[in-house]
Amino acid sequence: MTRPVLLSEHSRIALMHESGLTPPRKAPQFIAAFVSTLSAVCLGMVFSWSSSAIPILEKEFAITTAQGAWVGSLVTLGAFVGAIPAGPMAQLTGRKRALQILIIPLLSSWILIAFFCKYIWVLYIARFLAGISSGGISVAAPMYVTELAHVSIRGTLGTFFQVQITIGILFEYLLGDIISDIRTLSLISAVLPVVFLLSFAFIPESPVYLCEKAKLQDAQRSLLWFRGKDYEIDDELVKITEDIEESKRNKTKLFEIFKCKATYKGLIISFGLMAFQQLSGVNAVLFYTNKIFQQSGGSLSPGQCSILVGAVQVFATLGSTLLIDRAGRKILLVLSDLVMCISLAGLGLYFYLSEFMDLAAYSFIPLMSVALFIVFFSIGLGPIPWMIVSEIFSPKTRGVASSISASLNWFLAFLITNQFANMISAIGIGPTFMGFSVLCGLGTGFIVILVPETKGLSTEEVANILVGRKAPSPAGEKCNKMTTLVIASLITTVLIDRAGRKILLTVSSLAMSICLAALGLYFYFSNFMNLRALSFVPLVSVTGFMASFSIGFGPIPWMIMGEILSPKSRTFLSSLAASINWLLAFLITNQFANLVNFVGIGPTFLGFSVICGLSTIFVLSLVEETKGRSQKEVAHILAGNYQSALYSETLIIICPDIEN
């Protein structure tokens, strides 16, 4: 008797349990996903190669800092170029053949570097070729894995791509620590692309592609290989064929994707996730890990620190394969971006304060901060944006939108890695990481407000969420914190002439940002999770906020006004500043309820958190230390000829003689 064609994969799973049908075998799917994403291991090795190789190139071939930046960043520029035609290539030649073709430029790049590394222009060409492969593989490999995976393990197999990248990064860190010869390092790195080509030859083509080309017998054999011979493939083949026919009937041109509101909002979400992934500075951290640890002056060697970070990244990404289908996408993204923000803030403050303080006792902070940053990038902002892009778009727009999103990702990666060294030279390594921290904070707000949860939802359900409106979050209860204010203000009177104004303002605004972020996240997740076990968070957050405000941003701005303004202008400008202060106080208190009603109490506090993070940058960039200085000395500093830059650190200024 002919079995009925099932309407969805979920109904098929239910029928298996009820009627005893043989479920699909998982081992062949895991093997195919592992082998196909060996290409991602090759990508990881390309990305982290510069961390070990650039110091060697600077020493042996005297390349400049600017040339080293291009050697590191041309990979991402090549990836931007390679990602654009990768989708059409996979459609024309097949996913498997496309991956086999795309690995060839990467293999060629290692050979070029091995034998012609003394020529800088050859290095540029080789890295650009490797980038073309990287961009194409980043489109074709996830596509292949998604199409071979059964719905029951699609989320798990979808993380393989990022896991394999981290394994490649760790492997290249290990090689770089034990091999100091560029030729040997490159030739060993060239082995893995060969291994991929040989092993992938035994894995079938995607059944979806074979159905698209009307090769139904080949598609049947492919699906049997992936699911096992005892698995009934008829329903799945019919479903694949119907999806293909629907896609052909609704073939989309580039300009048409902007006509649908759900697709338009999906583009905003995918572009935002890809942008904030790269603007977090992750590729700058990976490409220049050794240099970061060289500047930190810790007890471990830079190579050992890089290996430790790489190992942490591998295990963290493996952890994401367990969490992704349990915790959900959105909560992992929020947690990931928030902790990355805090980690980069700690790293930036360490490097900033180390310019004028002895922090030898705290040399563990860079390693801890980078490791924490990599861990939380790997469980959220690393793998999930690529997955969400495939979940928020309909089949008819997915190909075009994915290509555009991938191209944007790689273009931003190029800009960040290419300009990272210039940013450090211009404003210092500390303010650079503080800037990345602020961008991570903004990314957290973007995710909380705009990114929907897609776990367990169909494309149609996600589209309904994108078009619909959510109910506002309920407000939280109020607390009286006057005791905290009094105690903290008393502490300020002790600290202000010892620690100085600027450092108290910096610590104050940063701690306020963290407390408000925790408060906002608590209220946001309390809307759909039981957080009774964490009911202490609002009390701790508000208390910490009030304490931090009272030791810095509460009293010090009023004091600094009297120290930086001359007696002649003090009266008028103090009145003007005070008027602005109270006007803004009126606007905030008057509109706070409206903000809560419009975006919810959680996103409101997260917005205030981002503003506090920006104020930290403002203090570090523009506010001068006035401790122990007369008004005339302060005037010398403010009127002196010095080069100002955003995020600039406290400068040692030789003031011109203003008596003239």
Image (cartoon, rainbow, N blue to C red):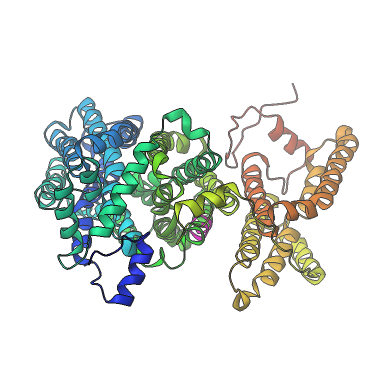
Is residue 134 shown in magenta? no
Q: Is residue 56 above or below residue 450?
A: above
Picture coordinates of residue 155 (x, y %)? Answer: 36, 60
Picture coordinates of residue 287 (x, y %)? Answer: 34, 44
Is residue 338 shown in magenta? yes
Q: Nearer the viewer, residue 287 or 10?
A: 10
Picture coordinates of residue 473 (x, y %)? Answer: 69, 60
- Residue ranking furthest to the front: 1
Picture coordinates of residue 320 (x, y %)? Answer: 38, 63
What number of labels is visible? 0
Q: Nearer the viewer, residue 73 or 147?
A: 147
Q: Is residue 474 visible?
A: yes
Q: Nearer the viewer, residue 316 or 452?
A: 452
Q: Nearer the viewer, residue 614 or 363?
A: 614
Q: Is residue 350 visible?
A: no
Q: Is residue 598 above or below residue 396?
A: below
Please tell me whether the stretch drawn in magenta is mainly helix, strand or loop: helix
- Residue ranking furthest to the top: 660
Magenta residues, start to end:
334-339
Which residue is rendered at x = 63% and y = 68% of the image? 526
- Residue ranking furthest to the bottom: 533
**Side of 293 relative to 202 (left or right):** right
Q: Is residue 382 above or below residue 400?
A: below
